[in-house]
Image (cartoon, coloured by chain):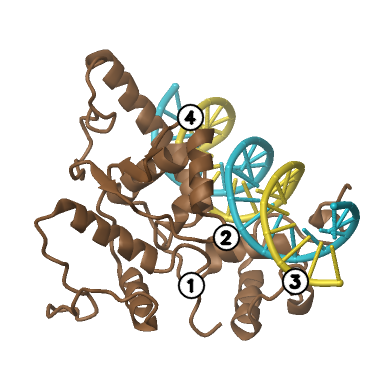
Chain colours: A brown, B yellow, C cyan
DNA sequence: AATCTCGGCAACCGCCCCGAG
DNA sequence: CCTCGGGGCGGTTGCCGAGAT
């Protein structure tokens, strides 16, 4: 069974998107949603294949995309998650609010791989027998590490991310990260922005999973107060729960679509 | 000032998975 | 159970801009 590539059809445009095309795609999806990506370009009047439209929307036009440089915290999170999940960019993206798999993949290949490579060099030349992490060997590394976290974190069920796939990823990358249903990793504090909070709070409001923090009384009342706990595991679980509850385990529901 | 080199990023390609018929 | 089509994912490419020479 050989299927012709979807863009093989004559007359379909390839290459960079114009602002006009972007506008057409945005307004169409805002009006009608994207039930069927293959049919979408025809209905919207775009000379693009469905895949191209989908990619453009997912990676660039979606309203919940966070633009701009990755923070150090995000980069560290990517490194940690990559260690856990391997090259499963979509799974990693699911844990980084507002970031796309493509973006993360690019950052990995352009920045983080080099950084890790550099760190490994330093590590192997300076402390080859120690059990220091590569990150802690980086003189520039800002240490966001908590004490090593043991958690029974269950990867959020989504189309591309379930327990078995995590295990597969671990096997595929040769990492034996999951033992006795516990994942050992170093969790950085994620950068929290307003969209993250609104999603976390709306997840709370949906009633699916009760959030246990209370509304804050600081300047921005949309920001809840963090739970105060002396138990580091609880604190870390709180952060991870928030990520998961924020609905990034799959394609987020977009308001109004 | 012109040319070259390199890095970053958007987009494409092809394969895989899964659900419907 | 098998086939087919759509969606999703990861790898790769190629363009463009910035910095170096």
Of the residues under marks 4 and 2, which one precedes in the sequence? 2
Q: Which mark is residue A159?
A: 2
Q: Position of residue B15 (x, y in %)?
A: 74, 42
Image height of A245 relative to A161, above or below: below
Quadrant of the drawing holding the C terminus of chain A: bottom right
Of the residues under marks 2 and 3, which one precedes in the sequence? 3
Chain containing mark 2: A
Is disc 3 placed on a helix, strand or loop? helix
2 and 3 marks in contact (CB < 8 Å): no
> Callout 2 environment at 10 Å: few (<14), some (14 to 19), or many (20+)?
few
Q: Position of residue A12 (x, y in %)?
A: 81, 61
To which residue does mark 1 refer? A63
Residue at far left of view = A230
Side (left or right) of A230 relative to A60: left
Is disc 4 placed on a helix, strand or loop? loop
Of the residues under marks 2 and 1, which one precedes in the sequence? 1
Q: Quadrant of residue C3?
A: bottom right
Mark 2 or 3: in front is 2
Image height of A37 relative to A104, above or below: below
Q: Which mark is residue A41?
A: 3
Is disc 2 placed on a helix, strand or loop? loop
């Amino acid at each position: 069974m050989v299927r012709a590539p979807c863009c093989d059809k004559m007359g379909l445009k390839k290459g960079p998107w114009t602002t006009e095309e972007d506008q057409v795609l945005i307004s169409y999806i805002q009006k009608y949603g994207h039930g069927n990506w293959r049919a979408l370009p025809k209905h919207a009047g775009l000379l693009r294949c469905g895949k191209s439209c989908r990619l453009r929307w997912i990676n660039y036009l979606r309203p919940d995309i966070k633009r701009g440089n990755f923070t150090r915290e995000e980069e560290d999170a990517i490194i940690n998650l990559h260690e856990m999940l391997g090259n499963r960019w979509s799974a990693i993206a699911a844990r980084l609010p507002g970031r796309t798999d493509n973006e993360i993949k690019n950052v990995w290949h352009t920045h983080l791989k080099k950084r890790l490579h550099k760190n490994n060099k330093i590590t192997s030349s300076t402390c080859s027998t120690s059990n220091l992490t590569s990150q802690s060997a980086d003189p520039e590394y800002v240490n966001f590490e908590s004490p090593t976290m043991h958690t029974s974190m269950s990867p959020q069920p989504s189309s591309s991310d379930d327990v078995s796939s995590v295990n597969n990823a671990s096997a595929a990358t040769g990492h034996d990260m999951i033992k006795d249903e516990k994942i050992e990793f170093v969790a950085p504090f994620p950068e929290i922005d307003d969209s993250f909070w609104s999603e976390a709070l709306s997840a709370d409001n949906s009633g699916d999973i009760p959030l246990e923090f209370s509304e804050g009384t600081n300047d921005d009342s949309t920001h809840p107060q963090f739970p105060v706990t002396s138990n580091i595991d609880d604190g870390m679980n709180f952060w991870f729960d928030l990520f998961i509850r924020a609905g990034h385990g799959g394609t987020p529901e977009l308001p109004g679509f």
